[in-house]
Protein backbone atom coordinates (compact mmCIF):
# COMPACT_ATOMS: atom_id res chain seq x y z
CA UNK A 1 0.00 0.00 0.00
CA UNK A 2 1.48 3.34 -1.05
CA UNK A 3 1.97 6.17 1.37
CA UNK A 4 0.03 9.38 0.91
CA UNK A 5 1.62 12.65 -0.16
CA UNK A 6 -0.02 15.27 2.03
CA UNK A 7 2.26 18.31 1.68
CA UNK A 8 4.64 20.02 -0.71
CA UNK A 9 7.27 22.64 -0.02
CA UNK A 10 6.99 25.97 -1.79
CA UNK A 11 10.04 27.94 -2.95
CA UNK A 12 9.80 30.21 0.09
CA UNK A 13 10.10 27.20 2.37
CA UNK A 14 6.48 27.09 3.53
CA UNK A 15 4.50 23.85 3.47
CA UNK A 16 1.10 23.68 1.79
CA UNK A 17 -1.44 20.92 1.28
CA UNK A 18 -0.79 18.65 -1.69
CA UNK A 19 -3.75 18.68 -4.07
CA UNK A 20 -3.70 16.39 -7.09
CA UNK A 21 -6.33 18.48 -8.87
CA UNK A 22 -3.90 21.41 -8.99
CA UNK A 23 -1.47 19.32 -11.03
CA UNK A 24 -4.26 18.19 -13.33
CA UNK A 25 -5.45 21.77 -13.84
CA UNK A 26 -1.91 22.99 -14.60
CA UNK A 27 -1.52 20.30 -17.25
CA UNK A 28 -4.91 21.20 -18.73
CA UNK A 29 -3.83 24.84 -19.01
CA UNK A 30 -0.67 23.80 -20.85
CA UNK A 31 -2.73 21.80 -23.36
CA UNK A 32 -5.17 24.69 -23.78
CA UNK A 33 -2.35 27.13 -24.48
CA UNK A 34 -0.77 24.95 -27.17
CA UNK A 35 -3.52 22.71 -28.60
CA UNK A 36 -6.54 24.79 -27.54
CA UNK A 37 -7.94 21.65 -25.91
CA UNK A 38 -7.88 20.80 -22.23
CA UNK A 39 -7.34 17.05 -22.91
CA UNK A 40 -9.09 16.12 -19.67
CA UNK A 41 -8.40 12.39 -19.79
CA UNK A 42 -4.69 12.66 -20.61
CA UNK A 43 -4.31 15.50 -18.09
CA UNK A 44 -5.78 13.30 -15.39
CA UNK A 45 -3.58 10.38 -16.44
CA UNK A 46 -0.43 12.51 -16.32
CA UNK A 47 -1.30 13.86 -12.87
CA UNK A 48 -1.80 10.29 -11.61
CA UNK A 49 1.58 9.26 -13.02
CA UNK A 50 3.17 12.19 -11.19
CA UNK A 51 1.52 11.11 -7.95
CA UNK A 52 2.75 7.52 -8.35
CA UNK A 53 6.31 8.69 -8.91
CA UNK A 54 6.18 10.88 -5.81
CA UNK A 55 4.78 8.01 -3.75
CA UNK A 56 7.60 5.72 -4.90
CA UNK A 57 10.14 8.35 -3.82
CA UNK A 58 8.36 8.69 -0.49
CA UNK A 59 8.83 4.96 0.17
CA UNK A 60 12.61 5.32 0.02
CA UNK A 61 13.07 8.64 1.85
CA UNK A 62 12.33 9.39 5.48
CA UNK A 63 10.11 12.43 6.20
CA UNK A 64 9.76 13.00 2.46
CA UNK A 65 8.13 16.25 1.35
CA UNK A 66 8.53 17.04 -2.37
CA UNK A 67 9.34 20.57 -3.49
CA UNK A 68 7.28 22.49 -6.03
CA UNK A 69 10.30 22.59 -8.33
CA UNK A 70 10.77 18.81 -8.21
CA UNK A 71 7.06 18.23 -8.74
CA UNK A 72 7.17 20.42 -11.86
CA UNK A 73 10.19 18.48 -13.15
CA UNK A 74 8.14 15.28 -12.96
CA UNK A 75 5.13 16.91 -14.66
CA UNK A 76 7.34 18.16 -17.48
CA UNK A 77 8.90 14.72 -17.93
CA UNK A 78 5.56 12.92 -18.08
CA UNK A 79 4.05 15.35 -20.60
CA UNK A 80 7.02 14.61 -22.87
CA UNK A 81 6.76 10.85 -22.24
CA UNK A 82 3.12 11.01 -23.38
CA UNK A 83 4.38 12.31 -26.72
CA UNK A 84 3.19 15.92 -26.39
CA UNK A 85 6.55 17.55 -26.97
CA UNK A 86 5.15 20.95 -28.01
CA UNK A 87 3.14 21.09 -24.78
CA UNK A 88 6.20 20.06 -22.76
CA UNK A 89 8.21 22.80 -24.49
CA UNK A 90 5.54 25.37 -23.62
CA UNK A 91 5.56 24.17 -20.00
CA UNK A 92 9.38 24.49 -19.90
CA UNK A 93 9.28 28.03 -21.32
CA UNK A 94 6.56 29.04 -18.86
CA UNK A 95 8.66 27.75 -15.95
CA UNK A 96 11.78 29.46 -17.29
CA UNK A 97 10.05 32.83 -17.57
CA UNK A 98 8.74 32.64 -14.02
CA UNK A 99 12.14 31.43 -12.78
CA UNK A 100 13.83 34.41 -14.44
CA UNK A 101 11.38 36.83 -12.82
CA UNK A 102 11.97 35.25 -9.42
CA UNK A 103 15.75 35.43 -9.84
CA UNK A 104 15.49 39.13 -10.66
CA UNK A 105 13.35 39.78 -7.58
CA UNK A 106 15.74 37.85 -5.31
CA UNK A 107 18.78 39.59 -6.85
CA UNK A 108 17.19 42.98 -6.19
CA UNK A 109 16.48 42.08 -2.56
CA UNK A 110 20.05 40.87 -2.10
CA UNK A 111 21.39 44.09 -3.64
CA UNK A 112 19.27 46.18 -1.26
CA UNK A 113 20.20 43.96 1.74
CA UNK A 114 16.48 43.25 2.20
CA UNK A 115 16.71 39.47 2.05
CA UNK A 116 17.18 38.38 5.65
CA UNK A 117 18.29 34.97 6.87
CA UNK A 118 17.75 33.57 10.35
CA UNK A 119 20.84 32.70 12.39
CA UNK A 120 20.99 29.87 14.92
CA UNK A 121 20.49 32.44 17.68
CA UNK A 122 17.22 33.51 16.07
CA UNK A 123 18.59 36.88 15.01
CA UNK A 124 18.10 38.14 11.47
CA UNK A 125 21.00 38.98 9.18
CA UNK A 126 21.13 40.20 5.56
CA UNK A 127 22.08 37.45 3.14
CA UNK A 128 25.57 38.14 1.79
CA UNK A 129 26.43 36.61 -1.55
CA UNK A 130 30.00 37.88 -1.21
CA UNK A 131 30.52 35.96 2.06
CA UNK A 132 29.13 32.83 0.47
CA UNK A 133 31.46 33.38 -2.50
CA UNK A 134 34.47 33.53 -0.14
CA UNK A 135 33.30 30.38 1.60
CA UNK A 136 32.99 28.53 -1.71
CA UNK A 137 36.35 29.87 -2.93
CA UNK A 138 38.00 28.49 0.20
CA UNK A 139 36.44 25.04 -0.16
CA UNK A 140 37.05 24.80 -3.91
CA UNK A 141 40.81 25.38 -3.77
CA UNK A 142 42.55 23.28 -6.48
CA UNK A 143 39.18 22.31 -7.98
CA UNK A 144 39.67 24.11 -11.28
CA UNK A 145 36.45 22.91 -12.92
CA UNK A 146 34.19 24.36 -10.21
CA UNK A 147 32.29 27.47 -11.32
CA UNK A 148 31.53 29.37 -8.13
CA UNK A 149 29.46 32.01 -9.94
CA UNK A 150 27.27 29.29 -11.43
CA UNK A 151 26.64 27.88 -7.95
CA UNK A 152 25.78 31.34 -6.63
CA UNK A 153 23.37 31.89 -9.52
CA UNK A 154 21.60 28.62 -8.75
CA UNK A 155 21.46 29.52 -5.05
CA UNK A 156 19.25 32.47 -5.99
CA UNK A 157 16.67 29.83 -6.88
CA UNK A 158 16.85 28.31 -3.41
CA UNK A 159 17.13 31.35 -1.15
CA UNK A 160 14.07 32.91 0.48
CA UNK A 161 13.60 35.50 3.19
CA UNK A 162 13.62 34.02 6.69
CA UNK A 163 15.57 30.94 5.60
CA UNK A 164 17.59 29.49 8.46
CA UNK A 165 21.35 29.06 8.30
CA UNK A 166 20.89 25.29 8.51
CA UNK A 167 18.54 25.37 5.51
CA UNK A 168 21.09 27.42 3.56
CA UNK A 169 23.80 24.92 4.42
CA UNK A 170 21.68 22.03 3.09
CA UNK A 171 20.60 23.99 0.01
CA UNK A 172 24.21 24.80 -0.86
CA UNK A 173 25.26 21.15 -0.70
CA UNK A 174 22.26 20.09 -2.79
CA UNK A 175 23.01 22.75 -5.42
CA UNK A 176 26.63 21.61 -5.67
CA UNK A 177 25.52 17.98 -5.96
CA UNK A 178 23.23 18.93 -8.85
CA UNK A 179 26.35 19.76 -10.90
CA UNK A 180 28.14 16.46 -10.23
CA UNK A 181 27.48 15.21 -13.76
CA UNK A 182 29.36 18.23 -15.17
CA UNK A 183 32.64 17.33 -13.52
CA UNK A 184 33.99 15.18 -10.69
CA UNK A 185 35.29 18.35 -8.98
CA UNK A 186 31.73 19.17 -7.92
CA UNK A 187 31.53 15.84 -6.12
CA UNK A 188 34.75 16.68 -4.29
CA UNK A 189 33.40 20.12 -3.38
CA UNK A 190 30.17 18.61 -2.04
CA UNK A 191 32.24 16.25 0.11
CA UNK A 192 34.30 19.14 1.47
CA UNK A 193 31.18 21.14 2.32
CA UNK A 194 29.60 18.16 4.05
CA UNK A 195 32.79 17.49 6.00
CA UNK A 196 32.88 21.15 7.04
CA UNK A 197 29.27 20.91 8.19
CA UNK A 198 29.98 17.82 10.31
CA UNK A 199 33.11 19.44 11.73
CA UNK A 200 31.20 22.54 12.82
CA UNK A 201 28.37 20.47 14.31
CA UNK A 202 30.80 18.34 16.32
CA UNK A 203 32.53 21.44 17.67
CA UNK A 204 29.19 23.06 18.42
CA UNK A 205 29.78 26.20 16.37
CA UNK A 206 27.22 28.82 15.43
CA UNK A 207 26.68 27.07 12.14
CA UNK A 208 25.98 28.32 8.67
CA UNK A 209 25.26 32.03 8.97
CA UNK A 210 27.19 33.21 5.93
CA UNK A 211 29.74 35.07 8.04
CA UNK A 212 33.22 33.89 7.11
CA UNK A 213 35.60 34.20 10.02
CA UNK A 214 39.38 34.47 9.95
CA UNK A 215 39.77 30.68 9.84
CA UNK A 216 37.41 30.45 6.85
CA UNK A 217 34.68 28.87 8.92
CA UNK A 218 31.13 30.02 8.44
CA UNK A 219 29.84 31.01 11.84
Image: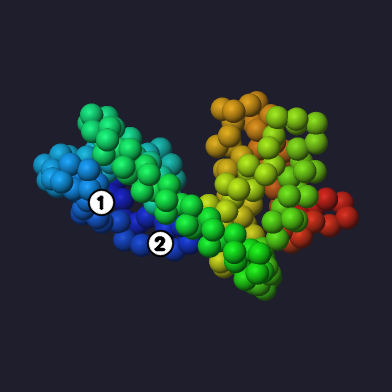
Residue under the point 30% across and 56% down: 18
State whether residue 157 is above or below residue 78: below
Q: Tell me where residue 29 appears, x and y as whole percent.
A: 22, 51
Q: What colour-coding does the image apply?
A: rainbow
The quarter of the image holding the C terminus is: bottom right
x%, y% of residue 7?
Answer: 35, 57
Q: Quadrant of residue 211?
A: bottom right
Name the residue nearer the viewer: 126 or 196.
126
In the image: residue 46, left or right of residue 181? left
216 up-or-down from 194: above or below: below
Q: Position of residue 187 (x, y in %)?
A: 64, 31
Could you tell whether 19 is left or right of 10 in the image?
Answer: left
Q: Nearer the viewer, residue 122 or 22?
A: 22
Task: Determine the residue positioned at 67% across, 44% down.
Answer: 149
> As displayed, is residue 85 above or below residue 92?
above
Label 2 neighbourhood size at 10 Å, few (<14), some (14-19), many (20+)? some
Instruction: Measure the alpha-carbon separation of dots 1 and 2.
Output: 19 Å
Q: Nearer the viewer, mark 1 or mark 2?
A: 1
- Secondary element under disc 1, as helix, strand or loop, is helix
- Asked where in the image residue 112 lies, by quadrant, the reply is bottom right
**Residue carrying label 2:** 15
Residue wearing tag 1: 26
Q: Is residue 71 left or right of residue 217?
A: left
Residue 197 position within the rendered picture, expressed as x and y whole percent measured from the top left: 70, 48
Amino acid sequence: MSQAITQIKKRNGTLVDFKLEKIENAVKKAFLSVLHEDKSEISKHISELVLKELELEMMTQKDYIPTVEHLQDIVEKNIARAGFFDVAKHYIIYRYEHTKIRQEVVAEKIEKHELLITKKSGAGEPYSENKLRKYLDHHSVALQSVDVELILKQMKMEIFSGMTTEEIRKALIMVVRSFVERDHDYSLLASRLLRSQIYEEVLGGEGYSLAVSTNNKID
